[in-house]
Image (cartoon, helix red, strand yellow):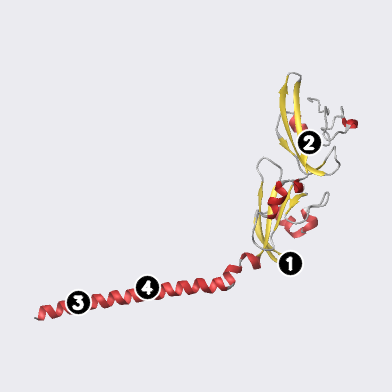
Amino acid sequence: DQSGALLAVVPSATTLLGRIIIGPYPYLAAAVAGRVAVSNGVPSAALSHPAVAFAVPFRTSSGLRVLSGGFDVSQTPLGAYMSHLVVIPGHRVFLIDATGTVIASSGPAPRPGETLRQVDRSLATLVATHAAGSYAAPQGRQSFFSADVDGTPWRIVVAVPDAQLYSSLDGPAKWLTWAAVGLLALAGLVIIWLVAGLLGGRARLAVLNGEL
């Protein structure tokens, strides 16, 4: 309600009813103040496991009310989406909150409270100040990109091996590209040679006609 007290909880947790919980949950405090809010990773009040939550305020004849729900992101379609966001082999995708806690990833479901710094300290350090770049990782040189998720305190981070990212430039495709360029250049030279020969033949023919 407008004081932050729980009126109903699903799954049922009767011991929580009437308790004011906006203190531990800033996103609920924001909703009680009248703003739609999305949380960082938080422990679920009902299930005691990591979750992310939304809170939506609305008006009733009895005053302001807030509807809030929480999800384990790795168990939602977003969790599957993380695994298919990038097709480059060896990619890693992380959805992190403002504290750096991993909400979901393209790999196994994150452990409760697991942070990006615990998974990859160098990547976490760079993401804190850079939107994109590259760095030396234990598994080889990596390139990364990160972006804020509008309307949330979340950020998505993508890291891929440089060996895979640039493989098309260093493998057979590189030589096929240069072969195509070479063939086009050769074809251009042949066309120029043919046109030059045609123009030369017309010039000689004009000279002959003048002599006759």
Question: Please, what secondary structure does the residue beneath circle 3 have?
Answer: helix
Looking at numbered disc 3 in the image, what kind of residue is underneath it? Answer: Ala
> How far across and down, in percent of the image, does residue 92 sit?
71, 58
Pointer 3 residue = 203
| Residue at the disc numbered 2 | 26
Q: Residue furthest top?
A: 61
Residue 138 locus on image (x, y percent)? 75, 66
Left or right of 198 in this view: 9: right
Q: Could you give the CA–CA distance between mark 1 and mark 4, rounded to whole angstroms?
A: 45 Å
Residue under circle 1? 139
Q: Regarding mark 4 in the picture, which secondary structure is present there?
A: helix
Callout 1: SS = loop
The label on residue 188 is 4
Question: At label 4, which amino acid type do we have?
Answer: Gly
Q: Quadrant of residue 58?
A: top right
- Quadrant of the image occupied by residue 149: top right
Q: Are marks 2 and 4 in contact (CB under 8 Å)?
A: no
